[in-house]
Amino acid sequence: MPGNKKRKSYGDVDEVMDENDTECCGVSFLRNFIYIFNFIFFLSGISMLCVTGWLFFFNMRFVTIFLSPIYSSIMYLSLSCALFIIFFFTTGCVGARLPKSSCLGCFATCLLLVFLMQISIGVLAYCYQFMVSKELLGSLNKAIAKGYAVDAATTSAVDQMQQQLKCCGSTSYEDWKMNKWLRDNITTSSSPTPTSSKSRSAALKNIGDDEKEVKRVPDSCCITMVAGCGLRIHPSNINTDGCTRGLELVVLDELNLVGSMALGFSILQIFGMIFSCCLVKKLQTWKTEDGKMMLL
């Protein structure tokens, strides 16, 4: 019928755009920018997933034993953000390929959510750094005094920490003098283990001078870990520095890396949202030269 307007296909739309859209920031330019942005957007998600996953699941996994749930929450939020980016990567590509403002509007909304998540990760990681030192000192002292050789997870975490960080105790190897495991395992070659608390206290006071066979520190404190090496305390045999400072530096480095990465990538989302909204506006108002087609 004469009054009917023929609806153009997406291929026809591309041809019309190439022929008529010559503006510096026209539809074609914005679509190409969205394509490039989506590729970078996808790579940022892969990077966040790989880095956070490696830090949280493979690099010194034992640190979660000594920290509050805030640390795990930051890592899980970063992993969720990375998966969210990868999942919604196709939304931007479809929105740029098809002249549909609804797809691009959905993509811009996704970018806003990602932006808010990344800002939250950065702020949490920064604020939590001021709590790490106090948390580690308290949790390590508790683990060494009461948890070691009592709880399997704590024992494994302490042994891994001391071996990987080349340290012993919380602030020094002397922290093990107050450990329940040490008090219960004081043995001498000439006399039975003291049973009363007073006798054990007296034995502990003489640990530094007693040359008899006494289990003084876990074998994981040793420079070269072999069975029974914790019987002899000497700088040539055991690591004498405490673990708190070394573990604190590791955690701070992880928080700085995750937080900086999240805040850095959040800047990308600002550009993505701006250009997505510009393209939506263009698609809602752009017409062909003869005025017979409008992209909605």
Image: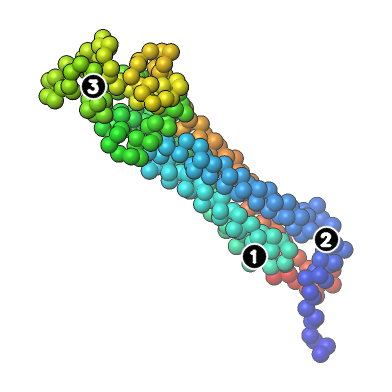
Give how far apart the Cα atoms at labels 2 and 1 are: 21 Å
**Percent of width and height locating residue 191:** 18, 18
* CB-based contact (under 8 Å), mark 3 and mark 2: no
Q: In front here: 4 or 201?
A: 201
**Residue under pointer 3:** 187
Quadrant of res 103: bottom right
- SS for dot 1: helix
* Spatial separation of the CA atoms under disc 1 and disc 3: 74 Å
Locate the N terminus by quadrant: bottom right
Residue drawn at x 51%, y 40% is: 58
Residue for badge 1: 103
Q: Residue at x 45, y 20 (%)?
A: 223
Where, quadrant-wise, is the C terminus in this rendering?
A: bottom right
Vertically, is 73 above or below 283? above
The crowd level at tag 2 (other Cα within 10 Å; few <14, some 14-19, many 20+) is some
Density class for disc 1 (Cα within 10 Å; few <14, some 14-19, many ≥20) is many
**In the rendered image, which quarter is residue 109 located in?**
bottom right
CB-based contact (under 8 Å), mark 2 and mark 1: no
**147 with respect to 165 (left or right):** left
In-front residue for pair 163/211: 211
Q: How many marks?
A: 3
Q: Which residue is mark 2?
A: 21
Q: Horizontal and vertical percent for residue 172?
A: 35, 19
Disc nearest the viewer among 1 and 3 = 3
Q: Is residue 146 visible?
A: yes
